[in-house]
Image (spheres, rainbow, N blue to C red):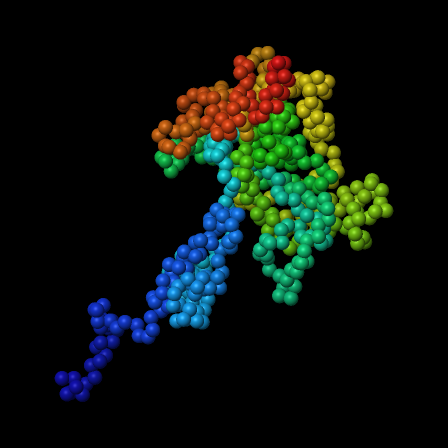
């Protein structure tokens, strides 16, 4: 009718969605042309098998057999041409890009990802260094660390928690970068002034600064609980707060006394204790500086516990190889990034060679010049490179120990005391350290990888009688009879929680630790002595020096 009348009514259909004519699948035409190469030959299966046979796990299994680790596109292409009959004749110029397009895209979020078919489950991966060396004791150690952190949470305002460890050394030298050259540059530079490194690092021997980090972790004022993935009740752990980094030159001692000095002089520990925080928890690295299995470290921990008038002091660590779990380890990432592309001078103003290469100097002259070099380098780090570094929402507090300065308040006679502790009982008595040594043994609960000092209730103990504990008797009882991880009967492959362990009562320390069973050295059988042996020498020294037998 519209056509007859000459009136255009097409405007009535404007804005309406148009229906597309569809055909059933059976009516669709197949793609014209020659079938794809992977449709003609079993390329996907052959390539997948080849790549899997040269993967990382396969490489680790056959260390003594010749073979590549990973596969390149030419290697995959050549294998397909040799292994699949007729492929070389049909496709003599088979390209590597054809093979690559059958794999997973390098980056799924890019526009070019749609060109990849994803038939072959392979791609060039990102580097991953998160895997740790296996350790049968890791689970036990980690559970015990959590017990200690939950005990701190239970104490609330009475607890003070620090995570402590050293960073990799910062190199000093005009021909060597301060930190690893492989770290990605994250800062802006002028287009015509980008960093250019020397083709090799040429470090000055011995010229390195050691940063020591202390991350304070604060429990909630009022203990709170949460539920784990198994539905069990657990205490909310202390949260990361402020952090302190102390820089030391190679001419300053770096041992257990250095860390205790840092807590006193730089981490404001005495102030916190004066405000009622009477229980200290230290989560440390298992290295020689802090290892609780070393007698010299135990001696200074005990002395620190007594001098600071603490109600309790717990020092624990993760299993060997698991130090990355220590929270303070995450502090080093922003610090390292801030030193990327930095060269710290190893010479004094007006000089062209470092003091160690000025052979005309006497030993004292060289030492004085090196002190100036290291003090200058540490000041640059503190004032210029780490002045605005932040971690866990707080500005990092950077401190400098003057190069060659006298350690205080501990460590002035560290080497003599270490020698006395490693020597005979007579040498220990002659050193004047026996009284402190006996004090340590009476107040110490020593286990493999952990030590706990707590005040006693003995009237004969002068220290504890004159300085009664501030924590409640119930909490002090837990600290003096600290629970040990025990396998859960309800959840296989898990240990019971800290709250469950407190209810179950006292169990033998380290009883369920694989290393304890492997060593087979047992515990001290003397009444009231809470000491788990870590080595045969430990057995002999303890029985001779503590019990006189």
**Residue 146 seen from this side:** no
Q: Measured from the top left, where is residue 64 in percent x and y?
A: 53, 47
Residue at point 69% right, 27% down?
Answer: 418
Q: Using the rendered view, name the quadrant where residue 167 is placed.
A: top right
In this rendering, the count of numbered labels is: 0
The residue lying at 63 percent from left, 26 percent from top is 295
Between residues 110 and 68, which one lies in front from this camera angle? 68
- Image: 148 above or below 114: above
Quadrant in which the N terminus appears = bottom left
Q: Out of 235 and 352, give the one closest to the viewer.
A: 352
Residue 5 at x, y = what percent?
15, 87
Q: Is residue 525 above or below residue 357?
A: above
Report the residue at 43% width, 71% height from top.
92
Which quadrant does the C terminus fall into?
Answer: top right
Which residue is most to the left?
1
In percent of width and height, residue 346 lies at 74, 50
């Amino acid at each position: 009718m519209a056509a007859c009348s000459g009136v255009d009514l097409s405007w009535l259909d404007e804005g309406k969605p148009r229906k597309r004519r569809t055909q059933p699948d059976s009516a669709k035409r197949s793609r014209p042309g020659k079938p794809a190469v992977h449709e003609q030959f079993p390329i996907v299966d052959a390539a997948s098998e080849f790549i899997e046979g040269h993967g990382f796990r396969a490489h680790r299994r056959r260390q003594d057999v010749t073979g590549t680790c990973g596969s390149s596109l030419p290697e995959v292409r050549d294998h397909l041409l040799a292994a699949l009959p007729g492929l070389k004749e049909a496709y003599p110029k088979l390209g590597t890009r054809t093979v690559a397009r059958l794999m997973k895209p390098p980056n799924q979020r890019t526009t070019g990802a749609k060109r990849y078919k994803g038939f072959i489950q392979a791609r060039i991966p990102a580097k991953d260094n998160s895997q740790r060396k296996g350790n049968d004791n890791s689970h036990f150690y980690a559970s015990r660390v959590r017990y200690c952190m939950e005990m701190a949470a239970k104490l609330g305002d009475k607890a003070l928690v620090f995570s402590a460890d050293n960073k990799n050394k910062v190199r000093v030298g005009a021909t060597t970068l301060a930190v690893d050259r492989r770290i990605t540059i994250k800062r802006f530079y002028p287009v015509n002034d980008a960093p250019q490194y020397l083709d090799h690092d040429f470090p000055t021997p011995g010229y390195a600064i050691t940063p020591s980090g202390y991350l304070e972790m604060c429990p909630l004022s009022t203990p709170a609980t949460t539920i784990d993935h198994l539905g069990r009740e657990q205490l909310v752990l202390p949260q990361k707060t402020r952090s302190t980094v102390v820089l030391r030159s190679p001419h300053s001692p770096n041992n257990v006394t250095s860390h205790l000095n840092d807590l006193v002089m730089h981490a404001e520990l005495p102030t916190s204790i004066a405000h009622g925080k009477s229980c200290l928890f230290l989560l440390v690295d298992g290295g020689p500086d802090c290892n609780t299995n070393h007698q010299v470290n135990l001696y200074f921990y005990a002395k620190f516990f007594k001098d600071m008038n603490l109600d309790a002091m717990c020092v624990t660590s993760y299993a060997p190889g698991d130090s990355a779990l220590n929270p303070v380890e995450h502090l080093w990432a922003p610090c390292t990034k801030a030193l990327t592309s930095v060269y710290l001078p190893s010479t004094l103003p007006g000089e062209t060679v470092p003091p160690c290469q000025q052979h005309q100097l006497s030993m004292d002259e060289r030492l004085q010049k090196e002190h100036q070099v290291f003090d200058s380098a540490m000041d640059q780090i503190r004032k210029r490179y780490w002045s605005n570094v932040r971690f866990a929402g707080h500005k990092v507090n950077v401190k400098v120990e003057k190069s060659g300065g006298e350690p205080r308040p501990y460590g002035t006679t560290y080497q003599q005391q270490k020698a006395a502790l490693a020597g005979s009982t007579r040498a220990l008595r002659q050193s004047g350290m026996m009284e402190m040594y006996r004090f340590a043994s009476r107040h110490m609960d020593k286990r493999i990888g952990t030590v706990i000092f707590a005040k006693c209730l003995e009237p004969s103990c002068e220290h504890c009688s004159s300085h009664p504990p501030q924590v409640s008797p119930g909490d002090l009882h837990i600290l003096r009879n600290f629970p040990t991880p025990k396998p859960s009967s309800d959840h296989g492959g898990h240990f019971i929680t800290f709250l469950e362990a407190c209810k179950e009562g006292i169990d033998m320390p380290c009883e369920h630790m694989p290393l304890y069973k492997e060593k087979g050295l047992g515990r001290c059988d003397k009444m009231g002595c809470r000491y788990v042996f870590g080595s045969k020498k430990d057995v002999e020294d303890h029985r001779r020096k503590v019990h006189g037998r």
